[in-house]
Amino acid sequence: MTSSADPVRPATLHDVARASGVSRGTVSRHLNGERYVSETARVAIEQAIIDVGYVPNTAARNLVRRRTQAVAFIVHEPHALFLEDPNIAGILLGTNTALSDADYQMVCLIVDSDRDTQRVARYLNSGFVDGAIVVSARENDPVSRIIEKLRIPAVFVGHPRGVDAAWVGIDNRAAAASVTARLRDTGRQRIGMIAAALDRDSGTDRLAGFRDALGGSFDERLVESVPLYSYSDGVAGMRALLEREPRLDGVFAASDAVAAGALSVLHAEGRTVPGDVGLVGFDDSSWATRTTPQLTTVHQPAAQLGAGAAAELLHQIGGAPASTEGVILDCPVVLRESA
Amino acid sequence: MTSSADPVRPATLHDVARASGVSRGTVSRHLNGERYVSETARVAIEQAIIDVGYVPNTAARNLVRRRTQAVAFIVHEPHALFLEDPNIAGILLGTNTALSDADYQMVCLIVDSDRDTQRVARYLNSGFVDGAIVVSARENDPVSRIIEKLRIPAVFVGHPRGVDAAWVGIDNRAAAASVTARLRDTGRQRIGMIAAALDRDSGTDRLAGFRDALGGSFDERLVESVPLYSYSDGVAGMRALLEREPRLDGVFAASDAVAAGALSVLHAEGRTVPGDVGLVGFDDSSWATRTTPQLTTVHQPAAQLGAGAAAELLHQIGGAPASTEGVILDCPVVLRESA
DNA sequence: AAGCGTTGTGTGCACGTTCACAGAATCTGA
DNA sequence: TCAGATTCTGTGAACGTGCACACAACGCTT
C-alpha cells in the first residue's frame, strides 16, 4: 500500500518523521538500532516507513559516516584466465558470501592493463570502498604499490614478495613438496615438472617445493616453464618435456588445468597414466575429477581463502591493525588415480 | 610531492580552491569539464590538485547528483553452478569491460536464497546503483518482480517469460534446431536429448528447438530432463537415456558440460563417438575443445551478451526508454569431431 | 521537596559536492 | 563612450543523513 506520495522524489527521513509524528533524530536512532526509543514511537515509525516507502539514501549515509559498506575485489589477471581459473571463481564466491553475511557489498575490478591500474587507483581513494581484497598480485605489482601508498585496509590472497600487507594463503611450497613426494614414493625415477606462472609467488613456490622434495636427484633439465596455469600451456609444456626426456615416468603439473593438458599429450603419445607415467596436479579444481584417470592433486580451499580474506578485511575496517603475519590454510594432498 | 596537509582528513574541494586562489565553483567547473574556466585558473587548479592530493569524494558527489556511476550485476544461480558455468564468467567479463570503458563500476550480487533476495531489493532502491544487469533469471523470479516494481533501469541477459523489460539474448530455439539438424543430416535415426534447466527460458527453448528439428519423428521417450547444465547431470542424464533406449545413435545435450558428462558415460559403456553415437552440445565453452573428440556445438557469444547488456543499460541510465523488444545475437553452429 | 540518574526527544550543524544565480570583467560594434 | 553580449567568477543554497548537545519527563533515593 505505497501511499500517493510524489513518485519522483523518494521518501526521506523527514517524510518518515512527519508521518509518524516524531522528529528526524528519533527515526534515525530507531534505524540505527540505538537505545532510547519508546515503544509508541517505535511502532509509529515502523508503520510510517512502510506507508511512505522509505529507503535510506546510501550516498547521504556514506557521506556523513565516511563508510560505504562496500569492498573492492581486485583481480589482476588477463581476462582469458579469469574465465579458466576455477580458483578465482571460488575465491570470489567465498568472499562474496562472507561479505554478504556482514551486509557488505562487493565491487569487482578486473585489472588487465595500465589503464585499468589507473582506474583502480582512482576508485580506491575516492572513498567508494572501505577496503580491498587483491587476488593474484605479482611481485612488484603496481596495484600493490598503490594500496601500500594509500594505506587503505587491504588483504591479499596469496603472498606476493615485497608487499608488506595482510594476507591469506596456502603453503604452496610445502604442498608442492608433498604431492611431488607422492611421485617419488611410488617409485618414479625420472620426475619432471611443468612449472607455470613464475612471475607469481605461487608459481615460484611450487617450483621450490618440487625441488625440495627431490633433493639431490633434482635435475634442472626436467623442469619446463610455461607462462600460465592453463590447459593449452600444459599441452605445450608436456610436449617440450617429452622431447627433452622421453624416459620420463613422473610429472608434477603446476595446476590441474596444466595437468589436464599434459594428460592429453601423454595419451596422444601412447603413454598410460598412471602405468607408464605418474601425474599429479595442483588445485583440486573441477578439472581433477573430469579427466580419465582422475588426478591426484593438492586440495586448495578457494572459498575459504576468499572468506578468510573477507573476515580479515572486515577486522581491519573495524579498526584492527593489519597483521602482516598472514594466515595459512591447510591444503592436503588428495589421492586419486593418476599417481 | 604530497604536501604536509593533515594526514587524517582528506583534501576537499575547499582546500583546492584555497591553494589555487579561486573559488569552489570554479574548481568544480574545471573538474566537470565545463566551459568558462580561464587558462590561468586552469593551470593553478591543476597544480593545486596535485599539491594537496585531492580526490573527489564519491559519496558527496553521488548525493547531490543522484547518480552513483555503479551498476549491479545480479546472478541468480546456486553458488556451485556459478563456479562451473563458463557462460556466466564470460558475461561478467563482457559487462565489466563495457562498464569500465564508460567509467562505471560493477557491483556483484549473487542470489542464492530468499535472504539474498531481500538484500538485493534493499540495495536496488537505496540508490547504491543506477541500474542492474540480471543474469539467468527464472520465470516468476522474485528478483525480476522487484525490478519491475522499482522501475529501475535494468537489462536482462536472456528472456524470461512474463518479464516486461529490456533484454539481450540468443535465439536458443533456432540454434537448438540447427544443431539438432546436424545429427539428423548425418544420418542418425534415434536421436535423444538431455534437456536441462527447464525452469529457465533457455532450457525450455532448447527443448522446443530440438522438437522443431525432429518434427514428426520426435519421440518424447527420448528426452531426459535434468535440473542443471552440469557435468554430473550430464552423466546422470546419459545413463537414464541409455537405459531407456540402448539403440540410441544421436544425442543433443543442452550444454557442453552436460555433453562432456554424457561423453564420459558413452565411453564407459564402450560406445565410440562419433562412430556409434553422434553427440552435440551447446555454448561452445572451453569444455567443447577439452573433450576427445571435440564437441560439435553452438557458439554462444557470452562476452558480447554481457557487453550488449551493459550498452543497453547505459542507454537507459542516460534517459532512453527501455526497449522491450530485445536484442538477439548470432550463435552459429560450430562443427567439430563429435557429430 | 530537593537532588539525581535514566530514558526519551527535538534541534542545529556538519559531511563535500553540484547547481542556480548574481555579479564582475572583458570584448564588440555603433 | 555607452549598451549589450560574452566570458569568467564567487556565493549561498540544497542533497539526506548521523551525531553532539540541550532539554523534558519520570522514577528513585535522601
Image (cartoon, coloured by chain):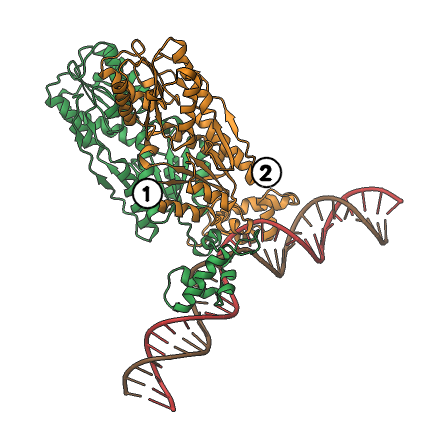
Chain colours: A green, B orange, C red, D brown
Is residue A221 rendered to the left or right of residue B191?
A: left
**Circle 1 SS class:** helix
Indicate the chain on which mark 2 is placed: B
Could you say which is closer to the camera, residue B17 or residue B58? B58
Residue A118, compared with residue A27, is above or below; it is above
B135 horizontally vs A8: left or right: left
Residue B24, how many percent across, how many down? 58, 52
How many numbered discs, if any?
A: 2
Task: Using a 10 Å C-alpha cutoff, classify the residue at mark 1 as few (fewer than 14 neighbours), some (14 to 19) or many (20 or more).
Answer: many
Hey, which quadrant is residue A174 in on the image? top left
Q: Residues within 10 Å of mark 2 (few under 14, many from 20)?
A: few
Can you identify the residue that label 2 sits on? B320
For the question of whether residue A289 can be seen, the reply is yes
Say which of A320 and A90 sits in front. Answer: A90
Residue type of the residue flagged with mark 1 = Thr
Where does the C terminus of chain A fall, quadrant-wise?
top left
Residue, x 43% and y 49% (percent of image)?
B122
Circle 1 is placed at which residue position? A97
Q: Position of residue C8 (x, y in %)?
A: 40, 71
Say which element carries label 2: loop
Q: Is residue B299 visible?
A: no
Residue A292: percent from the left, percent from the top?
Answer: 22, 19
Circles 2 and 1 on the same chain: no
Which mark, residue B224?
none
Question: CA gap, disc 2 to disc 1?
Answer: 35 Å
Q: Position of residue B11 (x, y in %)?
A: 48, 51
Mark 1, chain letter?
A
Task: State which mark lies toward you, 2 or 1.
Answer: 2
Q: Say which amino acid is labelled 2.
A: Ala
In this image, A274 relative to D21: left or right? left
Of residues A329 and B16, which is closer to you in this image? A329
